[in-house]
Image (spheres, coloured by chain):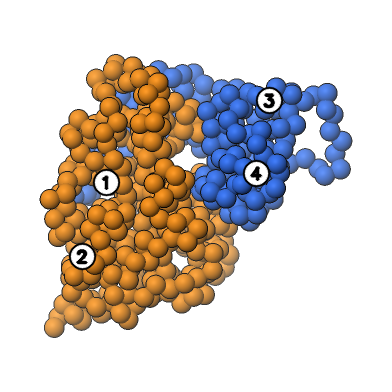
Chain colours: A blue, B orange
Amino acid sequence: MSDENEIIDVSDFDPQFRDEIAAEPGGEHIRRCFSCSTCTAGCPIAGVTEKYNPRRIIHMALLGMREQVLTSEFVWLCSVCYTCYERCPQDVRIPELMNAVRNIAVREGHVPTTFKVQLEKLREHGRLHEIEDYENERRAEYGLPPIGEEAEEVRQILAKLGAEEES
Amino acid sequence: MARFALYLGCSVPVRGMNYEMSTRQIAKRLGIELVDVDGFSCCGFPAKPLDWRSGLLMAARNLALAEAQGLDILTLCSACTGTLTEANHRLKGDAKLRAWANEQLADLGHTYKGAVRVRHVARVLYEEVGVETLRETVTVDLADFGFAPHYGCHYLKPSHIYDHFDDPENPQSLDRLIEATGARVVRYEDESQCCGGGILGFDEETALMVTKQKLDHVTAAGADALVLICPFCAIMYEANQRRVENIYETEYKLPVLYYTQVLGLAMGFSLEEMGIKLNRIKPRELIKQIRELASQ
């Protein structure tokens, strides 16, 4: 988050950034935002930390602060609770917008470690928590049926769409 | 008899076995057949932030597997519910997107026509079984207990993909389901607040600050337990409760129960059958009362 008194050089801005986001599924409604801050007022994350402020992020994106938005941590701080999605008077669909920005950031190589780890698990096990003999034995103790892992097809889905190279 | 494909997702079969056990038992009692479908994988939730197409295809693949069996899906995890419902909504409403997804799935030997309905177990209990029918199945009086409902986010929102079956700003379904067991619903501050789980992996400190708020509010309201319907919310409020206590030098010892466990106990199932052993913070008074009844 930049200092409040920092001077911003507008010549670095990318005026096409808003169009780029609008072309990305989920980001279509970005231009509708009129900065009312309803999203931020009800946001559970903004309620506990100044690190995340959805209104500010949208404003930065609309101004064309492409690098700052794509390389910052704040787009990853949306908990995707959809509270703002329900309340936004302009139907900006903010969680989907954040997801669109995340997808663009990922394509440029900005992937937080936690997501890399999750992706690795999906490729290896087809799920976030592995289920092998130990887990199935434990399940049997509680009278639950065994579960098989289906990693191969998940791996193919993730590979086909290039997530492999981009991570 | 109603039949559903039981979609467990990633967390439930490993970290929420008590949720799974109680769901299977109450379903059997209510005449709902739950079918275990081979090949279900992760719903796609963790892939969406990286590449929405991958997330969508993972969801579509699971939907296709259920469709091949001619079954609707019953979910336990709210994040899975949201991911599968959203993908389903998009695939049903957009023929071009569906054609694209099917081209991709063809290589894996799957196809999805759009015939599957996805519903959370709580929604099925509320809509399909109905509160009145549930009340008739209750044999153990839980009137001495007050439970704080935690709806979480993806069970209800975004409401348009859920046909607005409940009001996201003032939800009723879990309240009515709790009341059906004879227990009281305990009101508390900021009930619709998120568990924080969505950012746990990215920023644990911030996530737990969100978790702490609800633990504070529910404790202040004097509830006997927090009752919820999502394994990830349980990870935040139960598995991470000790961590929040340590960080903030406080103590909650707030029991966290899955709704299906509460309903099962009210139906007369044993503590063992409801997997209470796996609940880390024991609902001591509730256990005591169930044991006393069992020994009579």
Look at 53% across and 32% down and name the residue there: A26
Q: What x and y, as percent, mark residue B18? A: 27, 57
Left or right, B229 with reference to B50 = left
Numbered disc in front, either 2 or 3: 2
Helix, strand or loop at label 2? It is helix
Q: Are marks 2 and 3 in contact (CB under 8 Å)?
A: no
- In this figure, which residue is indicated by the disc labeled 3? A17
Helix, strand or loop at label 4? It is helix
Badge 2 crowding class, 10 Å Cα cut-off, few under 14, some 14 to 19, many 20 or more, is some
Helix, strand or loop at label 1? It is strand
Q: Upstream in the sequence, badge 3 or badge 4?
A: 3
Residue situated in front as seen by the camera: B293 or B241: B293
Q: What x and y, as percent, mark residue B34? A: 18, 47
Q: Chain of mark 3?
A: A
Q: Are marks 2 and 1 in contact (CB under 8 Å)?
A: no
Look at 27% across and 71% down and name the residue there: B181
Badge 3 crowding class, 10 Å Cα cut-off, few under 14, some 14 to 19, many 20 or more, is some
- Viewer can see residue A39: yes
- In this figure, which residue is indicated by the disc labeled 2? B133
- In this figure, which residue is indicated by the disc labeled 4? A54
- In this figure, which residue is indicated by the disc labeled 1? B74
